[in-house]
Image (cartoon, rainbow, N blue to C red):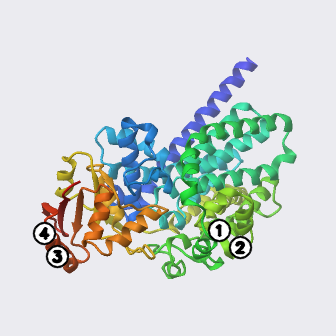
Amino acid sequence: MTLLSRAERAAHHAISRVGEVGVVTVYFVVSTCLLTYPQVTQMTTAIGAHYDALFSIWRLAWVAHQLPQDPLRLFDSNIFWPEPNTLAYSDALLLQGVMAAPLIWAGASPVTAHNLLILLSFVTAGVAMFLLARSLGSSLAASTLAGSIFAFQPYRFAHYPQLELLWTCWMPLACLYLHRVLSNGRLRDGLLLGVAVSLQIYSCLYYGVFLMLLVGIVAAGLWSVAPDRRASLTAAAAAVSIAAMLCAPYARPYLDTRPIVGTRTVEEVRDWSPSPSNYLAVNTDNRIYPWRARRAGHIEGVLFPGAVAVGLAALALIRPSRVVLAYLAAAVIGFDLSLGTNGVLFPLFRALLPPFESLRAPGRAFVLVSTALAVLAGLGASRLDRWRGRGGPTVVLALVCLAALESLSVPLTLDHVPPVPRAYAWLAQQPATKIAEWPVPSPTGLGYTRDAEYMFFSTRHWHRLVNGYSGFFPPSYVTFLNVMRRFPDASSLDYLRQARVRYVVLHSAPAEERYRELVTRLRSRADVEFVFRDRTTAEEISVFRLRGV
């Protein structure tokens, strides 16, 4: 009877926990739809207001296109012709691409798949942090609060057009398995820790680097109190082994591009380094703290963690436990790292740890602050829960709403997805070839660009593009931009022919007069053939074929 009673209690406890997770998941689904409104009503027609969103859609579409075609050449994407491994010029979004592929193969548009992944990232982040906080002893209400802080901070809304920077759920899950490794030393938990770290790397390379640092900080803070250090060490070794094995294939294309991509210069890092005042900056859509948006300068400078998170984290520091001190250390280190060259640690890590040499935007280390603060806030809210007695859960639930409202950005600013012009349907009917598009950005500075839009249009035909947009621009692309400053003189056309470019696509926006001039000049040349014209609501498009290619 005793054994049966224990089994019954364990089953009841498991059912109760599943019920909790189900209710909390519904909360995060509803909250995500409300806080990102009107996205849920415009899943096929609207995206985040930056061309990084089109870049993400192109990456998802490319993975879905290439996996069944030639998976061994997945990283040889159709941009920056003739360069190889061009998908490795930025975060490949490989995990999200694999998640989106079945939807795209089933007939969903890449835009819809992209937007579903955007919304799912908020839900999974909240639920994962809830699970971590609950495992650390936070109450149901306090754990929900921790999830809300992690899922809905202004930082996430500032990076809404950047899919890879929204996928953070693997960080709290990795911490959850790390705590299990330290408490019981089970090999299974070590393997799950390694898998969680690997999934974060496949979701976002920046966060993969920061997660490994977070795991190291928390493990160092709690190692001395592990009940069975030998078993924990064995499980930790299993975590390292499985992560290395799973990530080795992903690392190969990035290592192959290292000679051409190189490392980020100190000047680049300095340009993207926030200052401490950026911890008062919110996204420009924020309805609660609108006067603080001007402090950011750019989206990488939005680092306001939320007043509720800071206040409750401070509450957790009263007579802190070892867990609290470990996450406090993670928050402090993450804060300093996020300042880049304005801090102490980032230059030191650049000199000692090779992965940091490739990081341009140190402000993304805020994810360490975000994770640690959410954990600390959950522990602080649990104290408030206990102190206030029966009214505690009500107060904490009110704080859950307040924490979410601190990021209120409704209605979210979205861009309409550009309709794919008929010219690209015509190009899709042509044999495999190479294409150049105009206008192009200036070769100095690489500011305003339509290249992400051209890449999005290329998902209709998948021909090779000389154009491209990514986290790195190869020298051959800069040469192309310089050549196109003389376009359409004889030397520029000869250059395109040598690159085996068959079609040149001209767009009238944003330079209508220059477009008309180029069309007139190209029509007068005997070595160029006018083949297609398309007038959309926004612009006119002309397609020319270079004879002899």
**Residue corresponding to mark 4:** 523
Residue 139 drawn at (x, y percent)? 66, 50
Q: Nearer the viewer, residue 447 or 309?
A: 447
Q: Secondary structure at mark 3?
A: helix
Quadrant of the rendering where the C terminus is positioned: bottom left
| Residue drawn where x is 66% and y is 63% of the image | 369
**Residue corresponding to mark 2:** 343
**Residue corresponding to mark 1:** 338
Disc 3 crowd rating (10 Å Cα; few below 14, some 14-19, many 20+) is: some
Above or below, 38 relative to 135: below
Q: Nearer the viewer, residue 10 or 366?
A: 366
Residue 270 drawn at (x, y percent)? 62, 75
Q: Secondary structure at mark 4?
A: helix
Q: Earlier in the sequence, mark 1 or mark 2?
A: 1
Quadrant of the rendering where the N terminus is positioned: top right
Do residues under tags 3 and 4 come within 8 Å of each other at their CB atoms?
no
Q: Quadrant of residue 306?
A: bottom right
Which callout, 1 or 3, points to the residue nearer the camera? 3
**Residue corresponding to mark 3:** 516
Q: Nearer the viewer, residue 188 or 261?
A: 261
Q: Secondary structure at mark 2?
A: loop
Mark 1: which amino acid? Ser
Disc 4 crowd rating (10 Å Cα; few below 14, some 14-19, many 20+) is: few
Mark 3: which amino acid? Arg
Residue 352 drawn at (x, y percent)? 75, 60
